[in-house]
Image (cartoon, helix red, strand yellow):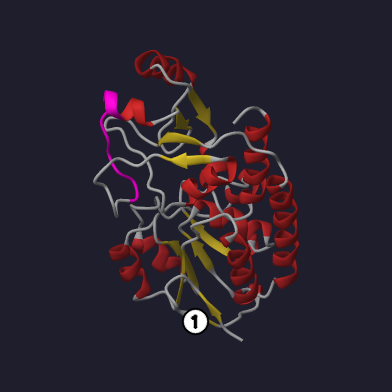
Amino acid sequence: MTYIDAMGHEHRPIEAMQARIVSLVPSITELLCDLGLASSLVGRTGFCIHPAEVVRTIPKVGGTKDVNLDKIRKLAPTHLIVNIDENEKPTVDALAEFVPNVIVTHPLAPRDNLALYRMLGGIFCVEERAETLCDAFEREYALLQATPRGPAQVMLYCIWQDPWMTISRDTYIARMMEEIGWRCWEPPGTAGMRYPVFKWSDEVVHSIDGVLLSSEPYRFTETHVDALEKQVGKPVRLLDGEMMSWYGSRAITGLRYARGLITSGG
């Protein structure tokens, strides 16, 4: 049996003890650990911070964008795991010249996690652990679906300032927002841009019901919330960026977090 990744590449199963994995995706690194594959991880990025007590012993190979190819080459990985949004194609292409198996991921909606669990579980022969995660996901998703929602709202989700940046509707975060009852506001004329830049204006403010500030990648805080509320005159809320944007095993907690946002008034 083979497993198909986001680029349509086929991957054959390999026993975990025979695999040497480098993960360039923080949420995937956490997922691999939760699948019981920590001992097979030989490299990770500096942004792979969960679970902290486990990853501190795994060598760093740079960031998600500024990868140290020489370090990875010396680790002699059998598998490299990347993501279309988080890792740059020229870097991945360079790594593919000496890493035998490059697994490309690209979940775009919460339920895509089920296929992600099963693909990685199948490739590394930990199918039972993958199904355990699938069961936990389905339980949380059912609870979320059963939670009554208020009126739909148009929300501006901010991931950066100087310049101000938001997200498109074709992103995992936007699909998480939809689960809560929030429609993602997109800047006009930015079709095809997944993380567009925008400028504040009266037109923008009139187009939205509120603003969401993410705790990552920019470290927005309650101080930013207070300042922006005075500036735009609309409700502004600080959200846990990991809960909204991390797929993998953290998505299960993310669904619970989303349910909490609904029950607390959205």
Label 1: element kind? strand
Q: How dense is the environment of label 1, judged by Cα within 10 Å: few (below 14), some, or many (20 and up)?
A: some
Magenta-colored stretch includes residue 174:
no
Reply above or below: 251 against 234: below
Q: Position of residue 193 (x, y in %)?
A: 29, 51
Q: Position of residue 201 (x, y in %)?
A: 26, 25
**Location of residue 36 by image quarter:** bottom right
Q: Is residue 11 left or right of residue 167?
A: right
Residue 200 is at least partly visible in this image: no
Q: Point out the stretch of residues depicted in magenta.
A: 194-203
Reply above or below: 14 against 224: below
**Location of residue 157 by image quarter:** top left
Reply above or below: 3 against 198: below
Residue drawn where x is 39% and y is 52% of the image: 62
Q: Quadrant of the N terminus?
A: bottom right
Magenta-colored stretch includes residue 202:
yes
Residue 44 is at least partly visible in this image: yes
Q: Is residue 17 left or right of residue 163?
A: right
Q: Position of residue 35 (x, y in %)?
A: 68, 62
